[in-house]
Image (cartoon, rainbow, N blue to C red):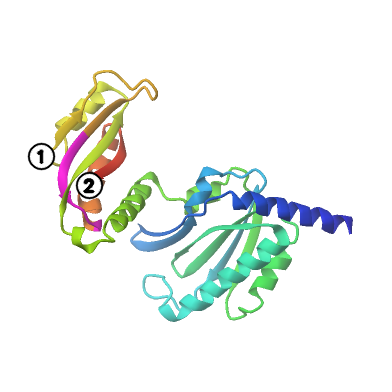
């Protein structure tokens, strides 16, 4: 009885902690060796990770029954795979206190990632979760991962992908009103550079012309010790605009050791 009380208290404590996390699920697709990789990840965990109370990663890999030529499931397999995910979340959460952090799909495989306080009972809960999916081949493992390396290297988007994700979200939020969809907006772009020379080289090699410089201080910022740059240029915002305009700016700033901090539309 004492063990069950301890386990129940631990799960309740972990549940209370999870309530403080602002979950933020996102799906993005990238290409690896010419093949798509679809990733679904809880971005909200990044502000808390690594969570010291959950130093073990539990990974389950399953084969997609009938993948297409790109290694992705056909629509008819979406439902059973989502049902499998729900079953894993339920059983691993109930037995081990594990939280689901994301999954990825590529080359006919899908992998699910969980983080747990320990590995006690994980095999039992995995078998229980997969009992209704006898038609699927699968394997699982659990190992120590106190720094959450699997979360940050496998699931979490790169700085580049985050730029695209948050840009897309911003545009979708703006264009809930379809009347604004084809309007042009003045857009502010912000950058930081470690040296004046880096910033000067960037400005000499901009991938686009027509910018108005708003701020070009000759001394570094007192908080970051970086040299900032603020510019603006008109644009018709779209998802294509992010790839065709923002991405080249991002890459150009990286080329000169800088960081593209982001863009902000001026909406009157």
Tag count:
2
Q: Position of residue 85 (x, y in %)?
A: 56, 69
- Neighbourhood count class around disc 1 (C-alpha, 10 Å): few under 14, some 14–19, many 20 upward: few
Task: Using the numbered discs, state the Cα–Cα distance from disc 2 to disc 1 in whole angstroms.
Answer: 20 Å
Does 80 sit left or right of 217 as displayed? Answer: right
Residue 255 point in image, percent of width and height: 27, 36
Which residue of the protein is positioned furthest toward the front in this rendering?
A: 268
Residue at image position (88%, 55%) is 2
| Among the 4 quarters of the image, the one containing residue 106 | bottom left
Whether tag 2 and tag 1 are in contact, CB under 8 A, the answer is no
Residue with the mark numbered 2: 267
* Nearer to us in this view, 172 or 133: 172
Q: Which mark is residue 129?
A: none
Classify mark 2: helix, strand or loop.
loop
Residue extending farthest to the left is 210
- Residue 238 magenta: yes
In this orientation, does residue 145 appear?
yes
Image position of 203 with respect to 185: above or below? above
Kindly state the secondary structure of the residue where label 1 is placed.
Answer: loop
Which residue is pictured at 62% across the width and 47% down the height? 145
Q: Main secondary structure of the magenta part?
A: strand
Q: Nearer the viewer, mark 2 or mark 1?
A: 2
Question: Which region shows up in magenta?
Answer: 231-239
Residue 36 among magenta residues: no
Residue for point 25% across, 61% down: 177
Return the residue found at the far right: 1
Residue in the foreground of this view, choosing between 17 and 179: 179
**Mark sitting earlier along the chain (2/1):** 1
Give me the residue at 46% from left, 60% from top: 40
Name the image quarter holding the N terminus.
bottom right
Circle 1 sits on which residue? 210
Q: Residues within 10 Å of mark 2 (few under 14, many from 20)?
A: few
């Amino acid at each position: 009885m004492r063990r069950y009380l301890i386990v129940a208290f631990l799960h309740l404590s972990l549940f209370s902690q999870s309530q403080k996390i602002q979950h933020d699920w996102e799906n993005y697709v990238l290409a690896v060796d010419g093949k798509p990789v679809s990733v679904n990840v809880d971005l909200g965990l990044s502000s808390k990770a690594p969570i010291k109370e959950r130093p073990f990663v539990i990974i389950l890999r399953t084969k997609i029954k009938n993948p297409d030529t790109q290694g992705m499931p056909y629509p008819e397999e979406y439902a059973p795979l989502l049902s499998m995910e729900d079953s894993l979340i339920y059983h691993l959460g109930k037995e081990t206190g594990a939280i689901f952090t994301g999954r990825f799909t590529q080359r006919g495989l899908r992998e699910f990632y969980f983080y747990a306080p320990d590995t006690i009972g994980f095999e039992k809960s995995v078998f229980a979760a997969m009992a209704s999916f006898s038609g699927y081949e699968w394997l699982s493992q659990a190992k120590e991962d106190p720094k959450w390396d699997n979360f940050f290297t496998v699931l979490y988007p790169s700085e580049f992908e985050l730029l695209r994700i948050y840009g897309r979200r911003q545009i979708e939020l703006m264009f809930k009103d379809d009347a604004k969809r084809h309007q042009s907006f003045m857009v502010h772009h912000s950058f930081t550079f470690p040296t004046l020379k880096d910033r000067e080289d960037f400005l000499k090699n901009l991938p686009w012309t027509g910018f108005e410089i708003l701020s070009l201080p000759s001394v570094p910022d007192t908080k970051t010790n970086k040299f900032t740059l603020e510019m603006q240029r008109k644009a018709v915002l779209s998802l294509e605009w992010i790839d065709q305009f923002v991405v080249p700016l991002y890459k150009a700033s990286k080329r000169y050791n800088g960081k593209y901090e982001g863009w902000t539309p001026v909406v009157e």
